[in-house]
Image (cartoon, coloured by chain):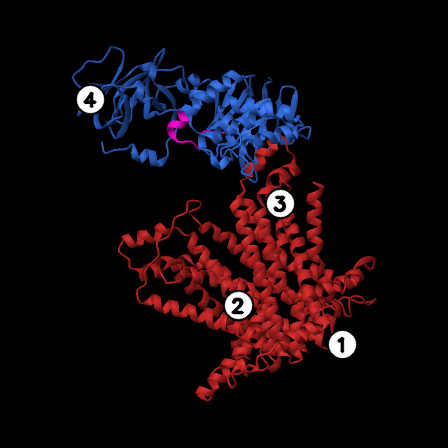
Chain colours: A red, B blue
Amino acid sequence: MLLFWAVIIFLAVLVLAPVVPTLYQSLLDRPLYEAGGTLSLDNYVKLFTEAGFGQVALNTVLFAVMTTVLTLVIAVPMAVVVVRTKIPGGRFFAAAMQWPFFISSLILGFGWIAMYGPAGFVSVKVQQVLGFVPWNLYSIPGMALTEAVALAPIAYTFCAGALRQSDASLESAAQVCGAGPLRILFQVILPMLRPPIVYSSILVISMSIETLSVPLLYGQPVNIQVFSTFLFRNGLQSINPDYGVLGAASTIILAVTVGLVFIQAKLLKDAQRFVSVRGKATRPRRLDLGWLKWVSVAAISIYVVMGALVPIVGLIFRSFTFIFTPLQSPLQSLTMANYQRIFNYAAYIQSIKNSLIVAGLGAVLVSLVALLAVMVARRSTFRYRRVAEYLALAPQAMPGIIVGIGLFWAFAYAPFGLGSFIQGTLWALIIGFGLRALPSGFGSLAPSVMQIGQELDNAARVSGADWIKAFTMILAKLITPAFLGALVLTFVTMLKEYSPAVFLGSADTNIIGTTMLELWVQGNTGSVAALATIQIAITAAFVGLAGLLLKGHNRDA
Amino acid sequence: MPDVKVSNLNKIFGDNVVLDNVDFTIKDGEFFTLLGPSGCGKSTTLNCIAGLEQPSSGAISVGDTTFVDTDKKLFVPPEGRNLGMVFQSYALWPHKTIADNLAMPLQIRKVDKTEQRRLIDEALDKVGLLHLRERYPHQMSGGQQQRVALARALVYSPSVLLLDEPLSNLDAKLREQARAWLKRLQEDLGITTVYVTHDQDEALALSDRIAVMSNGYMIQVGTPTEIYETPATAEVAAFVGRCNFLEATVTDVTSTGAALKLEANGQQMTVDTPEKVTVGDHVTVAVRPEKLAVLPADDTAMPGTNVISAEVLTTSYLGSRFEYDLKVGDHVVQVVNDRGGLAGAVNLTVDPDACLIFPQADVLSEDAQALLTVAP
C-alpha cells in the first residue's frame, strides 16, 4: 500500500514539476524567483497584443495542418499497399517504415538541408539542369514536408496495426460477393481505417505543434516563427527574456496539446470497440493490384529513398568532405577534418559522453519507473491505480521545450535550494529527458505485462506468495524480455532527445543535439554532419546489438 | 477438514450487481459445484473465497477462521488463506519446470529441501506424472498440464480445493475421462472442493451438491437428483439438462394436480403437482425429452397417461437412441426414444407425474423460441 502511494506521489511530483511553475509564472508579473510578484493576466494580454503572437499562431496552424495532410497522404496508402496487397519487397518496405523512428528529426532536418536546401546537393544539381529550383525548402510547406516524412511512420504504424488486426474474412466475404480488388480496397478496407486515421492525425497535429527542430532550422534564416521557435527565441536568444510572456505562451501551447492528447485518448478508447476479433490470428490474403502495384512500389521507394535515405546518406557523405556540391566530385575533397575537429575539442567529446550517460542511465531509470507505474496501474487492486496510468502517460502532452522551461523554473524555485544541486548538471537532463520518455516506456511495457495472464500471479497468491513475492518469483522473470525492449526503446528515445536541454543544459552538460545546434549556428556544417553520423552510428550499433541479444534471449524462453 | 461458510455475499461494480446476497455452507469433504451460464457470478464467488476479489459486503469463513467479514473490516489476503486453486488456463508458471512449479508454494512455507522433494514426488505420483517432473509446462499436453495444476494446488495440503472450470480446455473425450478421474481423486483425498463450471453434465456427474446461479442470484442448492428431477424454477429446468416447455391454461384443479389445456393445439392433459394453481392460470409445462414416449397413432396408450397427437418432423439417429422433433400445434417438441422408424402422425404420451408446472415464464431465448416454432 505504501509502495503504491509512493509510486503515485513520485509520478505526480515528476509530472507536475514542470507544469505548476509554468502556470504560476504565466500569471506573475516578474520572474518566479524574484520576491514580491503579483498575480495578473497581463502576460496573456501582452502576448497577444505586443509580442506578435498572432502571426506565430497562424504559422503554427498552417504548419500543423499541412504536416498532418501530407503525413496522411504518405502513410495511409502506404499502409494499405504494404499490409494488404501483393507487392514485391513488401517485408522490406514494412521494415523500412520503421527507420525514421530511430533518427532524430534534427538530423533529418540537417540531411534535408544538405540535399534540398538552397545550397543543397540536389538543389544545385536541379539548378544546373533546369536553370531554376522549383521548390523552396525554407518555407512552411517545406517544413511541413520534412516533418511529414519524419512523422509518417507514426500514422503508418496506427493504420498498419488496424489493418493487420481486422478480420480477413470481411474481405473474403466481399470477394465471394463478386467484388474486385479495387472495390474491396475502397469499400471495405479504407472505411475500416477511419478510426486510426482520426487518432493518428490528432497525434501528428500535437507533435507538429511541439516540434522544434525543423521549424528552427528552416524558419530561423527566413524569420518564420511557430510556437516552439517563438519560445526558443524569447526564452533563450533575447538578452532580457520576458518570463511572464514565456510562461503565458507555454501555458497556451500546453493547453492545446493536453486538449489534443485528451481527445486522442478518448477516441482511442472508443475505437477499441471497433475491434471485433481477438486472439485467433487469421492470415489475411493479400489483394493483387495488377499493374497498379508497380505504381505503388515506385511511390513507396520515392518516399523511402528521397525522404529518408538520400538525406541521411548525403549527411554521412557530407561528414567526410570539405564541401559537398555536385559542382565538384565529393571524392576529390575527402577528409577526416570534420571528425578531427570534434575529437580535438574536449567539449565536443564530452557532449558525446554526456549523451551516452544521459541515455544509458536515463533508460535504466525510466524503464524502472515505467515498470513500477505499469505494475501499479495494471496489476494491483489499488484504488487509484488509474491515476498512475494517467500520470505516466501525461508527458505525452508536454512539448519538450516546455518541459525544459518548466523544469528550469522548478529547479530555480525548489525548496531548500534542492534545485541548485540539480540545475546545470546531467541529472537535470536525465529528469527532463526521462519525463519525456516515460510514456513510451510505459506504452511498451503495459501490453507485455497484460499479456502475462493475471492467473499466473493469482496462482502464486493462492499458493501463499504475497504481492511482492508473486512479483519477484513469477512476473519479474517473465517480463525480462519486455523490460529489455523498453530499455532499448527509451535509450533510443533519449539519445534522440534534445529540446529540453536547450533550457536545462549548461556549458558543461552539452549533449550531441545541443552541440550540433551550436555548430550549426557557427556555420560548421561539416562537423554537424560528423556528429550526426556519430549519433546514427551509436543508435545503429545499439539497436543492432540489442536486436541480437533479445533474439538470443527469446530462443531461451 | 472444515466447513466453508459463505454468508450474505454481495459484490457490486458501479451499478452492476454481480453477486446478490449469496449464502451457502459447504460441508466438510463435500464436492460442491457452482453452476451457471457465463456472467452469473459463479467465478466471482470462487474468487471471493480465494481472496482474489473483495466482496462489497458479506462474510466468508473456513472452519473457525474468518477470511472476510466486511462488518468487522476483516480481509485476509489470498496468500494467508492456505487454499488450493486450479485455474481455467492452469496458470502453470512457464519459466519453471514441473517440479519447480510445485516447489514454489513449499519454499514460501519454508519446508526443508528433503521434505519438499518427498511432497513433490508424492503429489506428482498422485496425478501419475512423476516421470515428467523435470519437464517444462509447454512440453506437456493439455491433459498433463491440467493434472500438474491440480498437483500444485494439492502439494501443500490446503484446507479447501478451488477449481475454476479446470476441464473446459480439454477436448470432449478426454474431458469425460478426466471427470471420472477427478471424482475418484477427490473421494480418495476427502478434501472439501468448490468447483465452478457452466457444464451441467460435469456438475451432475461430479457433485455432492450443486448451486445453480443466475444473474448473481443463487436459484437453487441441492443434490444432482434434486436439481434435475425437481428444479425450483423453469430457469433451472432449462439450464440443467434439456427440457420442453409448453404453454397451457388451467381448466380444472384436482386433488393431486390440475387439468390443463395446451395452447399449442388445444388438447387437454392432466398434471400431478404440489404447486397451488387456480382455474384460468396461465402456466408453463416442463417435460424432459426422455420422459416422453412416442407411439404410432394406432397403438393404444397405457391408461392414465396423457396422449397428445403430434406429427414427426425429423428423426435423428444418435447411435444409442433416436431423437425426434415432433410438431404439436405450432410448437416443436423434442423426444428421446429407443424406437426408430416412426413417421407421420403419432401419439405422444407422458405420465402426469413426469410433468412439472411453473408460473408462466419466458425461459427460452428468442432464438430458441423461433427455432422451436413451426407453422401449425
Q: Residue B346 carries which label?
A: 4
Tell me how far mark 1 sits from mark 4, CA to CA: 104 Å
Q: Which residue is drawn at 42% across and 64% down?
A: A78
Q: What stretch is highlighted in magenta?
A: B164-176
Q: Nearer the viewer, residue B236 or A475?
A: A475
Q: Residue at x 54, y 66 (%)?
A: A205
Where in the figure is residue A517, as x and y percent of width and height?
Answer: 65, 74
Tell me how far mark 3 sits from mark 2, CA to CA: 33 Å
Mark 1, residue position: A240
Relative placement, left or right, of B362 versus A370 is left
Q: Mark 4 lies on which chain?
A: B
Q: Which SS class for mark 2?
A: helix
Q: Which of A462 and B33 is in front in this view?
A: A462
The quarter of the image holding the N terminus of chain B is top right
Q: Nearer the viewer, residue B324 or A547?
A: A547
Q: Mark 1 lies on which chain?
A: A
Q: Callout 4: few (<14), some (14-19), or many (20+) C-alpha neighbours within 10 Å?
A: many
